[in-house]
Image (cartoon, rainbow, N blue to C red):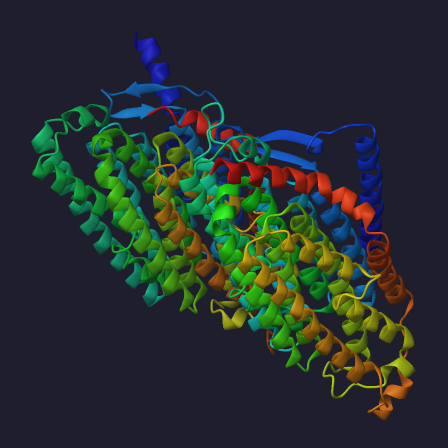
Amino acid sequence: MTMTMGIDFLVLMKQEWMVIAILFILLFIKVSGDDWQNKNILKLVSILLFINLITGFFWYRNGILFNEMFKTNHLIVTEKNILSLGTFIVSLQSYSWLKNNKQIIEFYLLLLSTLLGMFFMISAGNLLMFYLGLELSSIPLAALANFDLEKRKSGEAAFKFIISSAFASGLLLFGISLVYGTTGTLTLSALSEHLDGSPLQIFAFILLISGFGFKISAVPFHLWTADVYEGSPVTVTSYFSVISKGSVLFVFVTVLYTAFKSYAVTWNHILFILSVLTMVTGNLFAIRQNNLKRFLAFSSISQVGFILIGMSGQSQAGTASVVYFILIYTFSNLGAFGVISLVSAYSGKENMEEYKGFYKTNPRLSWVLAISLFSLAGIPPTAGFFGKFFLLMAGAGQGNYLLITIAALNMVISLYYYLKIIKAIFMDTNENPIDRLLTAPAPKLALIICTTGILLTGFVGYIYEYIFSMSTIF
Amino acid sequence: MVSLIGASVQFIFSFGLLFEYWKERTSGNGAQFLFDFNISWFEPLHIHYHVGIDGISLAMIMLTAFVVIAGILVSWTQETLYKEFFFLLLILSAGAYGYFISLDLFTLFFFLELAVIPKFMLIGIWGSGKKEYSALKLALMLMAGSALVFVGLIGLYFNTDINGAHSFDLVEISQMHVSTTVQNTFFPLAFIGFGIFTALFPFHTWVPDGHSSAPTAASMFLAGISMKLGGYGCLRVATYLMPDAAHHYAPVIILLSTIAIIYGAFTTMMQKDLKYINAYSSISHCGFVLLGIGMLTQTSITGAVLQMVSHGLMTALFFAAIGMIYSRTHTRLTEQLGGLLKVLPFISTVFVMAGLCSLGLPGLSGFVAEMTIFMGSWQNPDQWYRLATILACASIVVTAVYILRAAGKSVMGPIRNVQYNHLMDAGWNERLAAGILITGIVAIGVAPFWLYNLITPGTEYIIQHVGKAITLK
């Protein structure tokens, strides 16, 4: 009994154990006081994260631990794999930024703690466990936002993030406590039977949605996003926009489709309004941005709007399209951020005007950036086209053609601002363009992974099929 | 160089395809689509990569092959960023080929959008004049068009029921009856969406700006192929799959296309820039395509396809000639040109031939196509439809006015600028390009039956479909 129990512990929580192991290895290095060179630490961490990614693909098991506090299945493992992949890419990209940073180990300790928190959050079978994971993932994030210690903006970003995040957590906790008060349970799988639609429960539900809304920066809960994204170091911003957001979206899907299944009509309406607001606001603000980080912040807000459309669909197609899109979004957004972080690390330039004539000096990086932006805009043959198409298809499955039309027209608006950057890079001339950048092998590898992902994911129909087949289990 | 070889291979392949097609047909293969190839792409959603051709798509493929090879020959001397230039041209042509052979609406939509962004890049990077503005306008309007198409297709998809599942498959959808309400809801979306691509009035405004700013080869592609994407979509997707609605909305289509024809013709008269002349006349000519589709008779739809091919070749030739003139004289204004026939005999002849084709001179393809459309339209006994036909016929006179005037001003008469005396006539690549396109035009003009026979089986299917819809009422 204890024997199988032990194996269960190891296998079901394999990804968590891996991250904990990496954390301890880094901690030992730090404590031992050996003088490791940054280069070697970066190499070591990259290798460890790669191993972490690979182990994710083996020993799939469905199972429940600790009285449904922790559950796992194929879908959850895949979601964690996507996050591991994203973290791996982010870590490769941070190479040029962290090369000379004294606190490199602390950076990775914080980064991996958040990853661990997200893993627990995704695997949570209980609202309390979910909350625990969420806090573990968001508090170190605030420290990460402050990682450019000498920059004031970075501190401001961290402060804004911690306050808004604490507020969102407060809303969530209040919602959770009301749920517990009215139903007497916090277990997600049991919750749906106990919900009877009493006003207090509806209130709790709205609080929960607002809490989630904060975390995924859906309009009108998005106000913290732009400042935090702009102030944080580029690498952290990319981590924020892709991995942190993605993990909350994964949980959001599960919570809506399992615990609040009986409220489907209610949350369909809520999602409709939220998604339209999010898309339109995100798009309109993105048009006016000049700083590329801020710009990507708003563009990522509008992307969330599209994801919410996918969520409003039927459960299987909806879940599949959301997970599939986040995989693609990881590639595309990290591709775009990868180029921007390189430029920012070498020249400190982050404004759109400064990118004029970028193609003349850096043709390859320009193409990578262009492909990533096209993918974000949903232009074939990039993967973003397929991702968006399936999201909208999932949304249309409910017969909500008005929403689809609004979304399709929003894609045109979003294309406008993506094309504006393309125009600056390829068509405009500039007297002192950004110098030719020499890319170190690690960020280059990251960009290659992203580009390959963007170009191939759509054509390999098997990936979607695989995600779709898993999306039945909750 | 590589791209030329590639384009030549495409060119030869398309001829090979033509002969294979004829062989199959003459050997008694009566299937609707030949060379059917179907492979699952996203199985859970029943999305397949399904391609095959019938006469209509084959005609469009031939057109694409002609224009692509001519476009690449014309831009032979491209110097700045030539690799990127040809790369984008080839992506564009890949989009067009893929689009014409698609039998799955997802595949079709994929290729349709694939062809948009290369145009933006081509115009924005290598264009002239207010290129960024034109490029953005074109890309955004076309994307808006494809957004509407998208909603139309999705709506169609979710209202299909093939063995209990939804389907994007063109053949499968055509064999089932989609309810009339659904058709009436989604037909306008799809038709207007495709219509934007083919300069449906009042969504034609991208055409003049886009064409005039584009580099020569891109103009040829834009007018020659890309506007045909829309016409083909209107026919193959909107009309074929939603025949009830096509019948229902026919008056609107005819009204809009008649306005486009007349408006386009009169606006052209006011233009002084050669590229604008051709762009506006394209609006008028593409109006004929939509008119033919809207009339819903066998002859008129055949005429619409003929017109698509003919206009594609003719306008590509026209833009090629304008590009050749511009690259030598650095002006496209008719007033500043003049007497070019004396110094640039070959180019001027090409220019005049394209013009004559445009105004419908017998013996060239324009005459055949427009004649067929008018005959087909007249078969429709409704008096308002006949009025539209008469008006459309009358626009030919206007066409003759602007074409002859443009030709007269720019190539005839005395040489207005002494520097023109030293201009060099066309090089080998330009002669070859023009030769290929003229061959196509003359081949259709002198012996239209081969193309006619090619297209007819395809249009018969469509007409049967529409006929069924009408009798059902």
Q: Residue furthest top?
A: A1
Residue A31 in view here:
no
Tell me which residue sits at (55%, 58%) in the image: B383
Residue at x 75%, y 57% (from the top left corner): B310
| x 83%, y 69%: residue | B353
Q: In this view, does B50 lie above or below B163?
A: below
* Left or right of B280, for residue A257: left
Please state if B229 lies on the left or on the right of A214 as rendered. right
Image quarter in which the C terminus of chain A is found: top left
**Quadrant in the rendering for residue B264:** bottom right
Examine the rendered structure and indicate whether residue B117 appears above or below residue A423.
above
Q: In what quadrant of the picture does the N terminus of chain A appear?
A: top left
Q: Where is residue B375 in the image (x, y as percent from the top left)?
A: 69, 55
Q: How many labels does the image show?
A: 0
Residue B112, position in %: x, y? 60, 50
Residue for point 39% across, 43% down: A30
* Residue B59 relative to residue A100: left or right: right
From this viewpoint, is residue A450 visible? yes
How far across and how far down the image is residue B255, in percent?
52, 61
